[in-house]
Image (cartoon, rainbow, N blue to C red):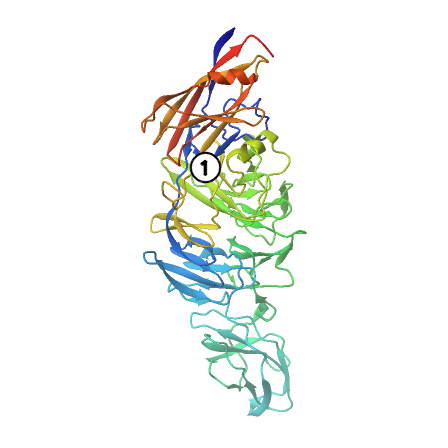
Amino acid sequence: MHRPRNATIGPWPKGINNSSRDYVLPKDAALDALNVDVTDEGHIVRRSGYSQTQAIDNGHSLRTLGGKTFIGLGTSLGVITAMNPLVVTTLRTSMDLRPVSYAERGGEVWWSNGVQSGRCNADNTDHPWVPPTPADIVTVFSGAGTLPAGVYRIAITQAMNDGEESVASAIYAYTLASAGSIVVTLPAASSGVDAFNVYCTVADGKVLQMYSAVAAATASVSITDNPTGRNLRDRAFLQPMPPGDAMCFHGGRLLVMAGEFIYYSQPYDYGVYDPAQNYLVLGATGSLMASVESGLFVVADRTWFYAGADIASAEPAERLPFGAAAGTVFQHPISTSPTVGWYSDEGIVLGALDGSVTLPQRSAGFIGPVAASGAAWVRQRNGTSHVVISLDDSSAYNKQVSPDFTAARFRYDDDSTCVCMNFANGATSRYANWFFNSYALIDGDEYGCDAEGLRLLDGTDDQGVAIVATLDCGKVGYGSLQIKSPECVYVAGKSSAPMVVDIALPEGQTYSYPARTYSETPKVMRHDGMKGLMNTRQPWFSTVIRNDSGSSMEVSAVDVVINESTRKI
């Protein structure tokens, strides 16, 4: 004897829950959601694809900042000035093949890949962070004049016409034995600099003051009088800022992260720092920094918040006991607090202005994969806001995830390199075949970059490859031990071809049932022909809704009509 009953599932505003077993999933969560986006209401929509590839080799570090779009092309860095056809103005060549970090200030974009660094000016020309340090003074000798005898200290800097100045050369001490003048032989100027600034003390003095500025081609300078210009001050002891793997501006300073250190510039003198004191020791290799108005988030093996506008006096407070994936910092698109985010070892973290943090994916029951690095794409379309996190090849789920989620992943595509989260509800889905290492908005269109090309992030397929979209609702019928089977399944939604219901049995067999029809406007579709499953004598089964041949799909609810026997065996 059989008795029918209904199991209504959805919507799914919490997205994937992979921390619960499939037979005790929360009503508003899914076991898996592949190649779909979760709407604010919890509906499941097949994601968009990508198209219109611009072929490139070893593409990386795509970023739009300061009104310019930058791209790494192997060991070169350039600015994209046109898309059709692709035109790139080269900034730097012969670089190490490493991801590039960027920061913008005053119309200039500063960049570094951890080995090389530079800044792009308004005319798309490449300049160093600070004019190059001059070579040491070649020689000094005496000449005729009226300078009093004594010990003179002399140093030089290189300068640009706009007033930018390098750090100083080594200080040369010269003893003038009798009254006369001092002749300073200058080194060859570095390429691109406009002038030398010459500094010296008075006889037996300690304070170096500017004596004169001369053209970069000048071979020597004669010091015939006491200096009257500005003091050299600490420029005698400063050094050019080192390159870093991550960088940002914060509180009037440039900060770079390199290994276990954060180096910070002099206030509003972004290209130089004091190597004796302008640094922080993290104790572990750093991965990222995120600046907010009230402080700085710093992530290495743990996550800290340095409260205050000046990193030189800020005290760290630990916020999370784990690290993060480098390269994943993003700005929150719809809120001023939280205002920044990144992808951590425990999923997406949102950081607020007061230094507090939240983990929306973990709150929704999702345990994310762990990776060393990645990229973030904040997307606002059709009234919803998502962040897509694409991770490197090291990405993997840990043993904390439910074994049922692992089995569900392997059923269709076990790709662990990309997750997508809805900002409104924290719902997570997975993407497969989505291997972008960076993203940018170019002329109003969104692009992703991978090693082979620039791809427009819009399309009905993935450059000709059908998008397989699935929604795994988990176990149905676990509430009783009676033998049962689905009699039919009703799916509320829309699609461009008949959707398919897959019934997966505990032993691993899967049976597929396409809908009778389809509709591109919201409608309830019936999937039937399942009565024969009663002969498999199962007490429960998994229900998966998927598209067919890459068709569009939107699912708002599922109703399973269960045919339940009075028998348990």
For residue 305, what is the image quadrant? top right
Residue 349, how many percent across, how many down?
Answer: 54, 40
Q: Considering the image in quadrants, where does the C terminus appear? A: top right
Q: Residue 180's quadrant in the figure?
A: bottom right
Amino acid at the residue labelled 1: Asn
Q: Residue at x 39, y 64 (%)?
A: 89
- Element assignment for label 1: loop
Please identify the residue farthest to the bottom as the structure is shown.
144
Where residue 21 appears, x then y in whole percent? Answer: 59, 26
Residue 450 horizontal/vertical position (percent): 46, 52
209 and 218: which one is in front? 218
Q: Work out whether 170 lies above or below 127.
A: below
- Give the class, few, some or many, for how many residues have Cα within 10 Å of label 1's Cα (few <14, many ≥20): many
Q: Residue at x 61, y 76 (%)?
A: 170
The picture places residue 328, in percent across and down from the top left corner, at 52, 47
Q: How many marks?
A: 1
Mark 1 sits on what residue? 35
User: Is 243 displayed left or right of 321 in the figure?
Assistant: left
Q: In front here: 259 or 512?
A: 512
Q: Residue lying farthest right?
A: 283
Is 403 situated above or below 524?
Answer: below
The reply, left or right, for residue 53 in relation to residue 484 is left
